[in-house]
Image (cartoon, rainbow, N blue to C red):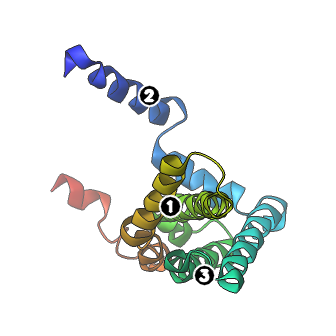
Amino acid sequence: VEETGAAQHLRDSRIATIYEGTNGIQALDLVGRKLKMDGGKHWKALFAQMRAFVSAIKSDGSLPMLQDPLAQAVDALQTAAQTLFDNEDYSLDTAAGASQFMRMFGIILGGYLLAQQAHAAKTMLAKGEGNKPYLETKLNTARFYAAQILPQGPALLGPVLAGGEELFAVNEDQFTA
């Protein structure tokens, strides 16, 4: 693989987690600072946009394969965000769910963005505009994501809300025993 350059691409992509901080540190920052920033108005506005989009595709009947999975995912994400936001202080329970919440957020936001692209592609195809194979690929990608990847987001709600009891049950002495 070295001759193809693929190995270098892998090394280059790994630097992002080192340069920007480990994923765990980014997750702790997300739930500890970013989620509570400005009273949560930023993520609440994003969720309102996501809900409006889901309502729009439900009312116009487009993208039936994305409607319910995306609606369920947004519900789960909002529940997770609101629960973490409502924690009075930065608790161990909040920290325990941080990495799973960041993963959940990324999966569901990715599904939302792909659904928007699929909606635009379907609209263009209906008008006979654009590059048909490319637009059909957008639709197929969104369908695949909705069936295979998006369900992983709501499945993370349990681990996000589970708290830290089990995570912190092992004390330092048990690591050295």
Sequence-earlier tag: 1 or 2: 2
Rendering quarter of residue 51: bottom right
Q: CA distance from mark 3 to mark 2?
A: 33 Å
Residue 21, compared with residue 27, is above or below; it is above
* Horizontal side of residue 119 vs 146, given as left or right: right
Q: Which mark is residue 139?
A: 1
Q: Amino acid at mark 2?
A: Ile
Q: Which residue is mark 2?
A: 15
Q: Nearer the viewer, residue 34 or 69?
A: 69
* SS at mark 2 in the image: helix
For label 3, the crowd category at 10 Å Cα-Cα, with few meaning under 14, some 14 to 19 and many 20 or more, is some
Residue beneath the point at 77% across and 73% down:
48
Q: Amino acid at mark 3?
A: Asp
Q: Which residue is mark 3?
A: 75
Residue 60 pos. (x, y %): 70, 81
Foreground tag (3 vs 2): 3
Residue 15 pos. (x, y %): 44, 28
Residue 9 pos. (x, y %): 36, 25
